């Protein structure tokens, strides 16, 4: 997902008058559109698939951070210990 400076940065007035075309563009190209207002970047318009991928990636990063915190606190178990505990509990 690379930004095409000519196509992917649009003023809000353009988005308002060409909303259907912009929705078609982002869904076909999966490129977000940066929306400007008074010459400043103010928002992003993106397709739902790309948005979900970003949310999923952030969720994964959060899980990794939790795991790293547990490692730093020495709150870990070996895989054998985990599987033994699961077998005792569920089998």
Image (tube, rainbow, N blue to C red):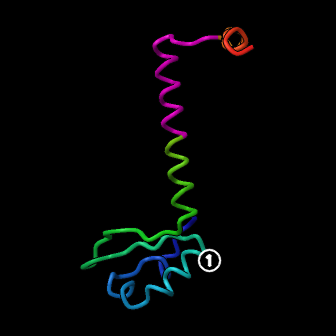
Q: Main secondary structure of the magenta part?
A: helix
Q: Quadrant of the N terminus?
A: bottom right
Which residue occupies 54% across, 71% down? 31
Is 67 included in the stretch rendered in magenta? Answer: yes
Range shown magenta: 60-77
Disc 1 is placed on an element classified as helix
User: How crowded is the residue under tag 1: few (<14 C-alpha within 10 Å), some, or many (20+)?
Assistant: few
Residue 46 magenta-highlighted: no
Q: Is residue 11 above or below residue 43?
A: below
Above/below status of 87 relative to 60:
above
Q: Residue at x 46, y 13 (%)?
A: 73
Q: Which quarter of the image is occupied by the C terminus?
A: top right
Please tell me how many numbered marks the rendered image carries. 1
Q: Tell me which residue sits at (51%, 42%) in the image.
A: 59
Q: Name the spot of residue 33 as percent of width and height, x first.
A: 46, 73
Could you tell me residue 57's position as x and y percent?
54, 47
């Amino acid at each position: 997902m690379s930004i095409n400076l000519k196509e992917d940065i649009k003023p809000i007035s353009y988005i308002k008058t060409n909303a259907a075309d912009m929705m078609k563009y982002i869904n076909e190209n999966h490129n977000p559109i940066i929306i400007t207002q008074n010459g400043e970047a103010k928002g992003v318009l993106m397709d739902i698939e790309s948005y979900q991928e970003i949310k999923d990636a952030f969720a994964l990063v959060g899980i990794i951070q939790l795991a790293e915190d547990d490692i730093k606190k020495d709150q870990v178990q070996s895989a054998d210990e985990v599987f033994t505990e699961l077998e005792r509990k569920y089998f």
